[in-house]
Amino acid sequence: MKKLLIFLSVIFLFFNLAKAQTTEIWIVRHAEKDRSDPQEKNPDLSEEGKVRAGDLAKYLKKENIDVAFSTPYKRTRQTLDSLVIPKVINYTDIKALVDTIKTSYAGKKIIIAGHSNTVLEIIEAFGGKRPREELTDDDYDFIFHLNVKGDKARVKMDQYGIPHHL
């Protein structure tokens, strides 16, 4: 009985430690896409976008990102290509993304590439407050850094690469 009590106490301790860990998450919108063919539903990055993807790698060069999440579009994946990341996972559902990160990647450093209509929703899904009212189709230079602990997130907004807004 004593061994069972000790075993349960240890499990409870590890569960609480995992729950109390701070997860660092950077969220970006994909870099500039090639708009030369308006009919293309899954375009590559433009030359400007490729430069921005390189700028993202420079911005995060001192961070050891553990895992990345990308929508299944070429432009989001290509935005992350300049980063050295051991694992890139596709996502399509924001709630499932948040649940996966909270249960399987607590305490890790993560980057998420999304779209102008999903980035702010992702921040809110982690418990953060929107740092901007909206992201437009011209907003490519923002990066959001979240420190997530439990159901709360502290959010910092920054810009990287060539400013889109002067």
Image (tube, grey):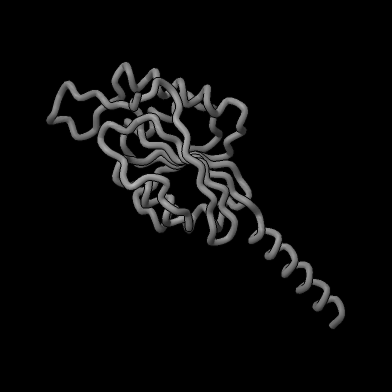
> Which residue is at 31% across, 45% downward?
134
Residue 102: image location, x then y, percent: 54, 56
Q: Is residue 7 above or below residue 104?
A: below
> Which residue is at 53% across, 61% downward?
151
The image shows a total of numbered marks equal to 0
Q: Is residue 47 above or below residue 75?
A: above
Residue 7: image location, x then y, percent: 79, 71
Q: Quadrant of residue 72?
A: top left
Nearest the viewer among 108 and 166 is: 166
Q: Is residue 23 above or below residue 46?
A: below
Residue lying at the far front in this picture: please name it. Answer: 166
> Which residue is at 63% across, 51% downward?
22
Residue lying at the far right in this picture: please name it. Answer: 2
**Quarter of the figure with the C terminus:** top left
Nearest the viewer among 67 and 60 is: 60
**Quarter of the figure with the N terminus:** bottom right
**In the figure, is residue 67 to the left or right of 112?**
right
> Which residue is at 51% across, 27% downward?
83
**In the figure, is residue 90 to the left or right of 106?**
left
Residue 32: image location, x then y, percent: 31, 26
Residue lying at the far left in this picture: please name it. Answer: 39
Residue 165: image location, x then y, percent: 34, 27
**In the figure, is residue 154 to the left or right of 11?**
left
